[in-house]
Amino acid sequence: MRTLPVLLLALLAAPLAGCGARGDTTTIKLAHTLDVSHPVHRAMELMAERLAQKSGGTMRVDIYPSGQLGSERETLELLQIGSLGMTKVSSSVVEGFAPAFRVFGLPFLFRDDAHRFAVLDGPVGEEMLRSMEPFRLRGLAYYDAGSRSFYTTRRPVRTPADLAGLKIRTQESAVAMQMVRTLGASATPIAWGEVYTALQQGVADGAENNPPSFHLSRHYEVARYYTLNEHTAVPDVVVVSTELWDDLTPLQRQWLQEAVDESAVYQRRLWAEATEEALREVEAAGVQVIRPDRRAFLEKGAPLLDAFRRDPEVGPILQRIQATR
């Protein structure tokens, strides 16, 4: 049986742990798995400041970073039972709760960044956020998580053929595993907090993630090849428990949504800066950054897109995404 962190046990034991009252103040507990220097955490700090300002100090957000309250999947489960108020998770994790989110894990889904933000900030993105509600989760906004690329320990990857025989760590996502297998590697799902050791000990030969996560996790210390093939652009999602949301007044909901929206704008700016800095830092540390011909990877991933066009749930969403201008 998995041992839960001490704080998680305390949280589960506490009444109204997701949203509690301290005098006249409504306190929301928010947990995520990233380091305090990460753009996500810094954006959440801004969110907390804005919410306190908008509410005149009657609402506050307490942030628990670095996986203190569990993995991304565990935090979503805590939201469902009302023991946690809010979290930030990858949409790859959301697909285990709201299956429509599988679409975001498909390779080369977006033509470019402008297309990606047009989808996320438009009707399709909004409908996807609302699709979580039958599962006692409410999506509030998307944070930028950039594009994911391969990094490896044993050898550089310049073409899909170079992935053959490599064990690549993926998120605990069926689509992520299908994507890695389609591109030519063996998929090995491993929790984020265990990836460094897995790479170091050879349990995995590589992983795939965006530049800031590759840098801030220090995975570059053991994975010395980073291939910017940018196979997926999986967004992060800020999620609130519907149990908490339903307990808020309409004005409190407005304050919270506005604070989250402002934090998302700020996070995207921080993300762009962090991406440039991460690439500079890992190259300075001796990592070989490879910029391959992406067309070979796109062609290799095409069969997975074709297969999901026939999926009754994902196919119509995929068609709308590709038609977005």
Image (cartoon, grey):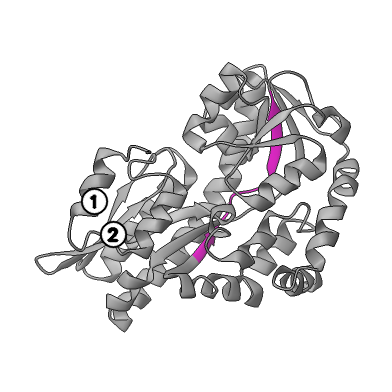
Determine whether, in the image, residue 6 is placed left or right of residue 308: left
The part of the chain drawn in magenta is 141-152
Mark 1 residue type: Leu
- In this view of the protein, which residue sits in the foreground, 112 or 317? 317
- Residue 203, horizontal then vertical, whole percent: 61, 23
Q: In the rendered image, is residue 222 in sight?
A: yes
Label 1 CA crowd tier, 10 Å (few <14, some 14–19, many 20+): some
Residue 222, picture quadrant = top right
Would residue 17 appear left or right of 271 to someone viewing this image? left
Q: Disc 1, disc 2: CB below 8 Å? A: yes
Dividing the picture into quadrants, the one containing residue 16 is: bottom left
Quarter containing the N terminus: top left
Judged from the image, the secondary structure of the residue bearing numbered disc 1 is helix
SS for callout 2? loop
Q: Is residue 173 left or right of residue 10?
A: right
Q: What is the magenta segment's predominant secondary structure? A: strand
> Residue 191: percent from the left, percent from the top?
51, 38
In the figure, 94 relative to 301: above or below? below
Which residue carries the number 1 mark?
11
Q: Is residue 200 above or below residue 306?
A: above
- Residue 83 is labelled as 2
Q: Which residue is the extreme one toward the bottom?
A: 250
Res 147 visible: no
Snapshot quadrant of residue 259 = bottom left
Q: Nearer the viewer, residue 48 or 237?
A: 237
Kind of residue indicated by mark 2 = Ser
